[in-house]
Image: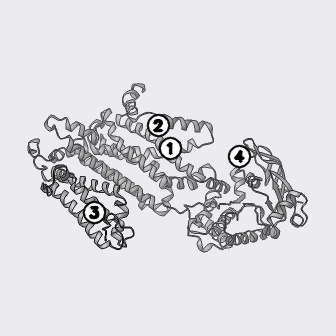
Amino acid sequence: MQTINFLKPNRDNIKNYSIIGSFLVLVSLIDVISNAFLKINLTSFLPGSLTTLFPLIIGLIGLNMMRIDYSGNKKLDLLNKNINTNNFNALLTLLILFSIIKALPQSLSWMIFDATISGDSKDACTGTGACWTYIKVWFRRFMYGMYPNEFHWRINTAFILVIALGFVGYFMKENLKKYLALYYVIIYPVIAYLVIYYLISGGSFGLQWVETGAWGGLSLTFIVSFFCLIFCFPLGMIFALGRRSNLPAIKYISICYIEFWRGVPLITVLFMSSVMFPMFLPEDFFMDKLVRVIIAITLFEAAYCAEVIRGGLQSLPRGQYDAAKSLGMGYWKMHIFVILPQALKLVIPGIANTFLALVKDTPLIFVVGLAELAGMLALAKTNPKWLGFAMEGYIFASIVFWIICYAMSKYSYNLEAKYKTER
Amino acid sequence: MSDPIIKIQNMNKWFGDFQVLKNINLEVEANKKIVVCGPSGSGKSTLIRCINRLEEHQEGDIIVDGNELSEKTKDIEKIRAEVGMVFQQFNLFPHLSILDNCTLAPIWVKKMPKKEAEELALDQLKKVQIDDQANKFPGQLSGGQQQRCAIARALCMQPKIMLFDEPTSALDPEMIKEVLDAMVSLAKGGMTMIVVTHEMGFAKEVADEVIFMDEGMIIEKANTNEFFANPKSDRTKLFLSQIL
């Protein structure tokens, strides 16, 4: 008697099984898709609960039949290896696929098909979909905060200048290359500060003074992140080296610094910098709140950077130190030419991690009254004329932040690949 | 008889409670070649690492080229620049090309002009026969080539003394010869060398003196011929019977 070996597909009947299997999976997918998009229930002839489970069961059987080891078919092998290794994984695959399909029509219609983008007031948004009009109307506020509209070109010019100056390193002449580190660590931040101070703050060269309280939106996110990033890295490097120093005073100062800043939450640091710190300053001494906040975040993140860099320093074999010393190099030469170039390469992923966290922490400055992108959203959603569009705002903000952060992480992967060395 | 270039007197060293070097006395004259042998853990490597102060000793005196090594020694870098060292694990700088490995210290420590340093480096690389690899990175070279590069790198500092810390122990048997050849030709050039090694053939060929160490002490110190032909202590005899 010939039995149908239903649960044990093998190479001999690969053709039948793979065809029947893929047909069953296809049926299950068609059922779910028609259900989700066309609102047609193909399996309405089945009793209640079975209707919902039908695609799952059919799909599972299909995937089971397709699971043939070393089938010789590359695509089938790839599929089996990645998403169809056993029944449980097949079930997970189907569940994920089905939930994506089910969620797709609703989110698509909300975000695109039923959404409104025309008009310039809340009245335009009458549909059931998203109200992108809100983003459109508020776009300038989200980008530039309360900065006067007619001066937005100043922010744009300043950013273009700062970015252009950042690329100077690429075009530097060969004989100037050795000053590159000096340029990026000291000269560039100073120039960037001056550019931002004179262009965005104004007050001289016939530019009207705009106080930092009016700054906001995405441009403020950039300003805060930019200065914190370029200052916290060298500072972190100093403390990482300090913590590994043989001199007790330097070592313990570094340990205290790192452990102090790692031990306090960023939000309290921000409050301290904006509320408490000015009380300790002499009456006639004024320091802008934005500057105080940037310094606070820099000091805070430097502690994290220091620990990441220390990890890289520790992962270098002792032989590298020995070799450098035996060639007569002192502490600084050894670190600048031998140790740091290798250690910093190793910590690129860790540093990228810290930097991403920093960029995403910048919305916290809202608590001290500085409204960057997320802060502007919080202000806009409470505007009486535009109540009820928080969702659109947050989706917009998350897309913006995602683009920034994804670009940063891509860049860090590139750096990693560029500076890879074989050991 | 000239003054010894290295003079070690009553030197003791501890790692924590453990005494690694016990009452070491050693004098090395310029242009002499000394081979240090002994079982592992006998303190051979620690001894030569003390000579350029990669390890600090706690008692006794070490005088290298007229400079005493102690905590008070200010220009330890200057002394190290005159003492080249080759390590068991090569310790090339993996982020720099072979040429840059060799020119780094001459340029930044000896303040040599870049061009001059490169000529010197190529010259030294040629002597160890890897000048054709100058633009590769250490990771792309075989162990023997890396070790020869490490020798060239140390020689680029034009040192007065060369220390070798088991230079062939991490190499395949086939590559040992090429490294030993480089060391032999260096020895014939008149360099002062202290070599920690298990290669007794090398010792017989170039060494003026052989030192046998065990448990942190110098057990035997003799002329090469006498050391192999007529060892005095039983411990040395046992060691030689196992290694030869």
Q: Quadrant of the C terminus of chain A?
A: bottom right
Residue A206 percent location from the top left of the image: 27, 43
Which mark identifies residue A307? 1
Tell me which residue sits at (61%, 55%) in the image: A320
Name the residue nearer the viewer: B95 or A12: A12
In the rendered structure, the residue with mark 4 lies on which chain?
B
Tell me which residue sits at (34%, 55%) in the image: A88
In the rendered structure, the residue with mark 2 lies on which chain?
A
Name the residue nearer the viewer: B223 or A37: A37
Which mark identifies residue A262? 2
Number of the front mark, 4 or 2: 2
Q: CA distance from mark 1 to mark 2?
A: 10 Å
Q: Residue furthest front?
A: A1
Q: Are marks 3 and 4 on the same chain?
A: no
Name the residue nearer the viewer: A91 or A256: A91
Reading the image, the residue beneath label 4 is B74
Reading the image, the residue beneath label 3 is A62
In the rendered structure, the residue with mark 3 lies on which chain?
A
Q: CA distance from mark 1 to mark 4?
A: 31 Å
Q: Quadrant of the N terminus of chain A?
A: bottom left
Relative to A411, is A389 on the left or the right?
left
Q: Amino acid at mark 2?
A: Arg
C-beta proximity under 8 Å, tags 1 and 2: yes
Number of the front mark, 3 or 4: 3
Relative to B127, is A297 on the left or the right?
left
Q: Amino acid at mark 1?
A: Glu
SS label for mark 2: helix
Crowding near pointer 3: few (<14 within 10 Å), some, many (20+)? many
Which mark identifies residue A167? none
Tell me which residue sits at (48%, 43%) in the image: A235
SS label for mark 4: loop
